[in-house]
Image (tube, helix red, strand yellow):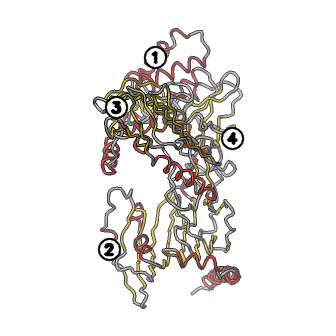
Amino acid sequence: MSQLFFRVKFRYCLVTLTFLTIYLSNFANDNIPDSLFYDHIKSSDAYLLYSFTDVRYSQSWRSYRRHTTYESKLVINNRSGVEKYAFLNLNDAFADQLESIVIKTLKADGTVVELDSSLVFRHQPTEGQMGRINYPIPGVEPGDTIEVLFTYSERLSRNELGNFVFMFNEVPSLNSEYSISAPPHLTIRYKLYNDFPEPLIATSDTLIYCLFQRKFSYGVLENQYTCSPCELPYFYYSIYDEDGKMKTWEDVYNLEFNVLTQPLRLDRRNAAHYRRWMRRVLREARDSTKYYQLELLLTDIYNNFSIEPPIREEVIRSSGYFIKRNRLDPISLRRLYRQILEDLEIDYWAVFARSKRMGPIDPYLVRTHEFDHIFFAWEDDIGSLNIIYPHDLYFKFQQGEIPTSLYNTEAIIAKPYRTGNIRRRDRYIRRDLNLAEADSVITDIIKLPGMDASLNYIRQIYYCDIDSHEKSTSFKSLLSLSGGLSTDIRSFFGLLQQDQEASDFFEAMAEYEGQDLAMEIDTITSIDLRNNRPYVFSIGAEGTVQSGISFINDSIVSITLDNLIQHNQLETEEDSIDLNYYLDYSYSDQYIFVITFPVNIEILGSESLNLEMENDYGSYTFHLTLVNNNQLSLHSNYSVTRDMIPKEDYYQLKELDDFIREANNRRILIKLLDI
């Protein structure tokens, strides 16, 4: 072999030895768990001896490849651990890219059982697994160790050279490592969040290597309100080539807003439909302000246009094409919004936002493709920002209304820097298909609006009439939804109306759970939606009380509270939680019953039925009042007053839920007089 080969090999080995010296020194100083952690792994269902993920990047001409190797050893402590963790859990997207897979069970008696990996590929995900291979590993018993090793490879574009990495598991881990390596002409950039420890770094003429490590990690169970990036340590990394530069807000604006919203002018014959529509809607408002004209146009879109799935052949059609057909799709709608704003010469911004539980935006490390909400904000004559959130296939947003997952979150707004009006050639994509890109943008950070429990409420009012002859109870009701609850429930109704599969699923769930409705609705008498904040949505109805109010005999009526009152309480089934609750919003849930009897009545029992409880995160009140000797007024109010509940204070939610459960587990006896 040539001396050059030995010289390169020597340099590689020297870097490796240097790195190992640092690593082993570090490991020697911190390789003994404390007694608390030792007790933790003994009491857990399973624990990881180690989990190693090695990611290697390579480049060939303009294409990139990521080669990933994963290796772990999982010790099963008990029968519960077998039931939970004796599975290979793998994203189905990697199945076609797997290069090798080895799964072994190291038995407690020293024997080794190896799983036939071909069985894994023949195992298709069942419905509801959402594209995951969840293959059972047979023959696992308490005391066994499951060893997993697999590799897969992916082809990537330049915009895909990066990742968010969370190094935590449901089970405790003695040692978790994540390494990244790349050839020296590529650059690895990383940023640590929430006190993630600094990596170990080694470089040579042939390699750049970063090792991220966490030792003695406690197991962490997520909940439905978890925001992992808000509190768990993690890191983000990206790979750049020699010509690469860090992303800018100009890149984000052009790639994720401009390309989707810039109007088209390819079919001139349809442009007339857009102009005629503008003249028709604004006929009586030509002398009004441009902001009032915008309101009229947005209202007409809301009332008169359906939102349908996009059709490939219509992607290059102009706004007039869709206006002629009284329908839009999510892409053409965004183009129409932008065209209206620019024609009315209203100053507007692009808004880039992330759902609350995806974690906050880092404005100082710009990344593309991390925003799940992109929409418009426009400035009125006093400089206030107003939001236009585009309708989707299942739901139409009122002016200023936003998804509840964005309440009280920070967002980035951006617009091109200009010294004059928009040039006409920059407003449309023409036949040359050239996109007018922004050379520089102005950005700012804003806090998106939210609402508190006084505006986020569900209120159910029932006016009940007792018929002592038929021994039945009829009612008239008014259901009012406000704020975030209005948005969420209207959106859910829209999903059920548009998606038959989702409708069938929730209907089957209701049948499976066997929940009988205490209040059976016979007729919907009214539906009303107010188009200004807090978007109160009301439904009036009439019906019959099926359970909850019943006759024991001719003169005694029983009111069973847990049949009539079912508050939307936060789940508190666990004794404790590992991560905080991040709610979209605080809210209140109110029940009011006005029950009228045909004769005077007496409430049996000497004890007071009124109850109250309040703590730092919520409150509950129950009041029962006798009115005019023949009417009961019953008020039951439940409130969650904070949108973030720390895990240390979770017990306060449990105490509140237990109190409500006991309060509703009561029966009120009413004696009918003069019978």
Left or right of 128, for residue 202? right
Find the distance from the CA under tag 1 to the CA under tag 3: 52 Å
Q: Earlier in the sequence, mark 4 or mark 1?
A: 1
Q: Residues within 10 Å of mark 1 (few under 14, many from 20)?
A: some
Residue where numbered disc 1 is placed: 277
Rounded to the nearest angstrom, the CA distance separating label 3 from label 2 is 64 Å
Q: Label 2 amino acid? A: Ser
Q: Is label 3 or label 2 in front?
A: 3
| Picture disc at residue 118 | 2
- Point out residue 285 in the picture as x, y percentages from the top left corner: 55, 11
What's under tag 4, amino acid-wise?
Ile
Give yes or no for contact between labels 1 and 3 (Cβ–Cβ under 8 Å). no
Q: Residue 307: x, y in percent?
A: 41, 31
Q: CA distance from mark 4 to mark 1?
A: 36 Å
User: Is residue 482 toward the left or the right of residue 551 in the image?
Assistant: right
Q: Nearer the viewer, residue 270 or 335?
A: 335
25 with respect to 401 (left or right): right
Whether label 4 touches label 1, CB < 8 Å = no
- Binning the other alpha carbons within 10 Å of mark 4 as few (below 14), some (14 to 19) or many (20 upward) gives some
Mark toward the start of the polypeptide (4 vs 2):
2
Badge 1 element: helix
Q: CA distance from mark 3 to mark 4?
A: 55 Å
